[in-house]
Amino acid sequence: MSDRLLDIAGASTPALYRVADAMLLLNMSRSVIYDLIRRGRLRTVNEGRSRLIPASAITEYVALLEREAGVAR
């Protein structure tokens, strides 16, 4: 297992994730991640030319999905 996957698995929790890491965490494709970003459902920050996703944004997105699922019931 690579160091990056160990980080994602919880050995240590980074504050910012690359899009590829968010894909693994959320089990979504690259195009879906970018669509979520474009629609404002997944918050990002830019550092230089890199688009990064804060860990808090991933938590907020999962909470949003849970709220939406609760409303649908």
Image (tube, rainbow, N blue to C red):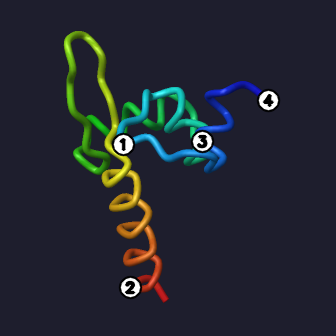
Instruction: Please state which amino acid type lies under the numbered disc 2.
Output: Val
Identity of the residue drawn at 67% across and 34% down: 5
In the rendered image, the residue lying farthest to the front is 12
Q: Relative to 33, say whether 51 is above or below.
A: above
Position in image of residue 12 (x %, y %): 55, 45
- Residue at image point 30% right, 16% down: 50
Q: Position of residue 21 (x, y in %)?
A: 53, 33
Residue tagged 1? 15
Name the foreground residue: 4 vs 61.
4
Is 7 situated above or below 59?
A: above
Q: CA distance from mark 4 to mark 1?
A: 21 Å
Label located before the other in sequence (1 or 3): 3
- Tag 4–tag 2 contact (CB < 8 Å): no
Is 5 above or below relative to 49?
Answer: below
Q: Secondary structure at mark 1?
A: loop
Residue 64 in percent (x, y) is at: 35, 67
Labelled disc at residue 8: 3
Q: Which residue type carries mark 3?
A: Ile
